[in-house]
């Protein structure tokens, strides 16, 4: 029977339903009949039997890491909702999604009104993402269908698992995640009972299999590319303090703090390697370059920005002013004049997904040279290399400041040496970008405001100060910022942006403020210092190496006046 003929019967079925419901017990009979038919359909629909990929069963002893990949999750959700159990999924989804956007928005607003006083982290997250709490509420209402879909998928998978525990794809992934998060066995047993998780023993078996595969993967990734045998994959690591918590404490059985190191292997992009001559990626080339650097005379003019860099920094400051203007002060009523909220790109990396492999957590002494040696030994033990093979390659390491300092200290102590595995001369350490950004930002914040744990508010303070400067220029500093932003011609907004820059960021303005108003002078210094941190964060998120190096160049000068950044002054490139 064709779909058209079946659909033509709908009016007849609706008419019969109306006639039946006219009787006193007709509605109950109709619901019982529909329930019985729905039960038959739900009982008939189920995931296919057998092992993955033909079936829905995942063996913990043959599990693959792709169980946690977004691709697998998407395929699993699509199969469950469209092929295996579509009736139950659509029934649940339609029930939860049978609301208008206005009703959902009212529910979201009332919920956030209760939580806004306590939920400061969510406010910070919105501000750092360039959004307000008001934007988050609007987004939450439009995201309700996605929330309903995710909930319906979860319930459907729970039903499939309770009916047949071999339908365990999502439950197996959940059990491993819950184990890593420290969920107790008692809680996990309840989650397994309701169909959200597999057993704890299954999670341990899966972890053993995954650890074995990860060990093989690390050994493979640590091998140098055939085209550049003397160049090793990049290593990135940082110190980590993690606590092993004991839920039921007793004598000799309590919480324990471990000092360790986490990190990953970064396999270089083959296209990037192909763009560099092979002769420049050898140990000989590296040693010659380091010899030249040791004889380099550092002059102050090296840190003076070039005309191109100075012009770009001007555009950076204007873009930050423009962003504060358009978000909190006024909107453009036309597009006659272009207002740029992002500075020009200098040297942006390719937005391809990096090839990284996580290393096993390593126990090491905290911030000591011995700890660095233990980290190197742990990395070599995880790879298929000997210590001699590891030392005979050019190894570039991105690490935190303490690790970079300790490696340099070890190199100075062991050079000269007749054994390559002892002198560590082929290891080059570079400060990690995120670690440097956080510490420099915290030091700059403390320089202006004293020691304060709320240095994460730096970006908000900077933007609020820019808004004040803009309102001073506009002559509206005593007026409250309205929720609905006024609209002004784009030419007028561009004029205000230029006047704000001239009044608060030019050398002449800083010189005048230093002579007449120390308070205004300190405000200008803070604006410039905070602007470097905001730009560094934006450059890292945008993958623009050129912009980031310009910021690091400024930090090399700023660190001269901040005692807590003395070591960064030495290691900043």
Image (spheres, helix red, strand yellow):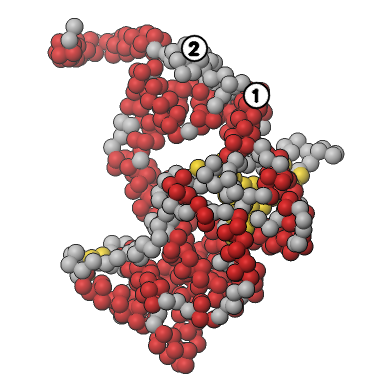
Judged from the image, the secondary structure of the residue bearing numbered disc 2 is loop
Most extreme residue toward the top, as rendered? Answer: 1
Distance between the Cα atoms at labels 1 and 2?
A: 20 Å
Q: Which numbered dot is residue 8?
A: none
* Quarter occupied by residue 245: top right
Answer above or below: position of 290 versus 200: below
- Taking depth in this image into account, of 113 and 97 the one nearest to the observer is 97
If the image is split into quadrants, where does the C terminus sit? bottom right
Q: Does residue 129 show up? A: no
* Residue 274 in picture, x, y percent from top left: 45, 49
Q: Element type at marker 1?
A: helix
Nearest to the observer: residue 572 or residue 538: 572
Would you identify the image quadrant in which residue 177 lies? top right
Where the N terminus falls, by quadrant?
A: top left
Vertical placement of residue 237 versus 321, above or below: above
Q: What residue is pinned by disc 2?
A: 50
Q: In the image, what residue occupies the spot 44% across and 13% down?
A: 48
Q: Position of residue 373 (x, y in %)?
A: 74, 51
Left or right: residue 186 versus residue 536 is: right
Q: Residue at x 61, y 38 (%)?
A: 218
Circle 1 residue: 205
Q: Are the residues tagged 1 and 2 within 8 Å (C-beta)?
A: no
Percent position of residue 82, x then y: 34, 21
Q: Residues within 10 Å of mark 1 (few under 14, many from 20)?
A: some
**Viewer-nearest residue: 272 or 69:** 272
The front one of 394 and 184 is 394
Seen at 70% across and 48% down, the residue is 376
- Density class for disc 2 (Cα within 10 Å; few <14, some 14-19, many ≥20) is few
Q: With respect to residue 355, does 128 lie above or below?
A: below
């Amino acid at each position: 029977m064709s779909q058209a003929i079946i659909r033509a019967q709908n009016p007849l079925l609706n008419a019969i339903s109306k006639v039946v419901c006219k009787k006193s017990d007709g509605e109950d009979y109709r619901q019982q009949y529909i329930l019985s038919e729905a039960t038959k359909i739900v009982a008939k629909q189920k995931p296919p039997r057998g092992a993955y990929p033909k079936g829905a069963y995942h063996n913990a002893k043959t599990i693959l890491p792709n169980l946690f990949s977004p691709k697998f999750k998407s395929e699993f959700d699509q199969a469950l909702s469209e092929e295996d159990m579509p009736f139950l999924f659509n029934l649940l989804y339609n029930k939860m999604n049978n609301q208008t956007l206005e009703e959902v928005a009212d529910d979201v607003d009332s919920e956030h009104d209760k939580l806004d006083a306590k939920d400061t982290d969510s406010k910070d997250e919105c501000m750092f993402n360039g959004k307000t709490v008001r934007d988050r509420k609007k987004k939450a209402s439009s995201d309700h269908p996605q929330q309903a879909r995710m909930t319906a998928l979860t319930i459907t998978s729970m039903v499939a698992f309770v009916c047949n525990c071999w339908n365990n794809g999502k439950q197996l992934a959940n059990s491993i995640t819950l184990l890593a998060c420290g969920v107790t066995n008692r809680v996990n047993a309840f989650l397994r009972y309701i169909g959200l998780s597999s057993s704890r023993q299954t999670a341990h078996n899966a972890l053993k299999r995954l650890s074995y595969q990860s060990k093989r993967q690390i050994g493979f990734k640590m091998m140098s590319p055939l085209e550049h045998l003397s160049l090793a994959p990049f290593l990135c690591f940082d110190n980590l303090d993690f606590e092993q918590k004991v839920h039921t404490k007793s004598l000799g059985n309590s919480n324990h703090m471990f000092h360790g190191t986490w990190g990953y292997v970064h396999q270089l992009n083959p296209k990037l390697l192909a763009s560099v001559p092979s002769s420049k990626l050898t140990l000989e080339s590296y040693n010659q370059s380091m010899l030249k650097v040791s004889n380099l005379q550092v002059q102050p003019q090296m840190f003076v920005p070039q005309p191109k860099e100075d012009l770009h920094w001007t555009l950076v400051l204007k873009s930050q002013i423009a962003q504060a203007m358009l978000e909190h002060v006024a909107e453009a009523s036309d597009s006659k004049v272009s207002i740029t909220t992002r500075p020009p790109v200098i040297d942006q990396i390719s937005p391809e997904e990096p090839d990284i492999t996580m290393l096993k957590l390593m126990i090491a002494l905290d911030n000591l040279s011995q700890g660095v040696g233990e980290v190197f030994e742990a990395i070599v033990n995880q790879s298929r290399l000997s210590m001699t093979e590891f030392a005979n390659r050019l190894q570039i390491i991105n690490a935190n400041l303490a690790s970079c300092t300790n490696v340099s200290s070890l190199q100075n102590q062991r050079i000269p040496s007749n054994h390559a595995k002892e002198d560590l001369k082929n290891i080059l350490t570079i400060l990690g970008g995120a670690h440097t950004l956080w510490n420099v930002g915290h030091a700059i914040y403390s320089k202006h405001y004293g020691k304060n744990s709320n240095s994460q508010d730096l970006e908000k303070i900077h933007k609020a100060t820019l808004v004040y400067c803009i309102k001073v220029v506009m002559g509206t500093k005593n007026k409250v910022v309205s929720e609905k932003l006024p609209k002004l011609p784009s030419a007028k907004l561009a004029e205000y942006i230029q006047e704000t820059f001239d009044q608060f960021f030019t050398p002449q303005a800083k010189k005048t403020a230093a002579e007449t108003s120390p308070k205004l002078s300190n405000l200008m210094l803070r604006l410039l210092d905070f602007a470097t941190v905001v730009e560094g964060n934006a450059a890292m998120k945008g993958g623009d190496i050129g912009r980031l190096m310009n910021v690091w160049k400024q930090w090399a000068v700023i660190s001269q006046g901040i005692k807590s950044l003395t070591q960064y002054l030495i290691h900043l490139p």
